[in-house]
Amino acid sequence: GFLGLGVGVLLWGLHMGLTQGLLSALVAEAVPPELRGTAFGMFNLVTGGALLLASVIAGALWQVYGAQATFLAGAAFATTVRVIHRVHRGAADRGLDTAPALRTGLAQLLQVVLGVRHFTDAGAAVGRN
């Protein structure tokens, strides 16, 4: 009923509050100030597209295979992320700094999406070649 809906909304809001600031900080750190607006726009476009795609997949799983398949797929994705996190954490525990690889990967993704070779080439990013 309404209590379950309220709890769900509360948990969703808590999740958004805990994750959005972190993701925004990663985007802001990965690009120079003159390209932050473009980077945030692309970040929100890609995030929105991923949420839409995830919702369509979840809906299709629910329609075709039922509720159990939808939740099992969610558990599989969560388990995969947990394994990746443990590998990353294990590397950090051994003294390997994996944070630069994450920042480099994010920067490379943004470079591909924005279509610029270097982030210092702000004119190319906004179409002023």
Image: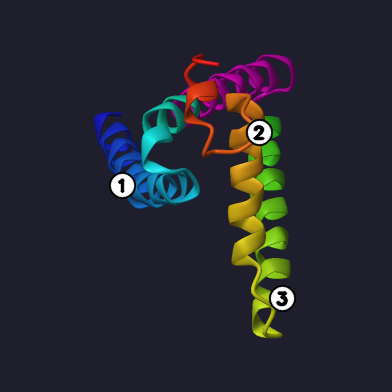
Where is residue 47 shown, x and y percent of the image? 51, 29
**Mark 1 and 2 residues: CB-CB less than 8 Å, in contact?**
no
Residue for badge 3: 91
Where is residue 2 shown, x and y percent of the image? 25, 29
Q: Residue at x 49, y 15 (%)?
A: 128
Q: Is residue 115 above or below residue 13?
A: above
Judged left or right of residue 84, residue 13 is left
Q: Residue at x 52, y 39 (%)?
A: 120
Q: Amino acid at mark 3?
A: Ala
Residue for badge 1: 17
Most frequent secondary structure within the magenta stretch: helix
Residue for badge 2: 117
User: Dot 2: what SS?
Assistant: loop
The segment highlighted magenta reads 43-67
Quick one: quadrant of the C terminus?
A: top right
Q: Can the viewer see residue 126?
A: yes
Q: Amino acid at mark 1?
A: Gly
Is the residue marked by circle 2 packed among few (<14), some (14-19), or many (20+) residues within 10 Å?
Answer: few
**Mark 1 and 3 residues: CB-CB less than 8 Å, in contact?**
no
The quadrant in which residue 100 appears is bottom right
In three-dimensional space, the C-alpha distance between marks 1 and 2, rounded to whole angstroms, equals 33 Å
In three-dimensional space, the C-alpha distance between marks 1 and 3, rounded to whole angstroms, equals 28 Å
Q: Amino acid at mark 2?
A: Arg
Q: Can the viewer see residue 48?
A: no
Q: Is residue 98 above or below residue 35?
A: below
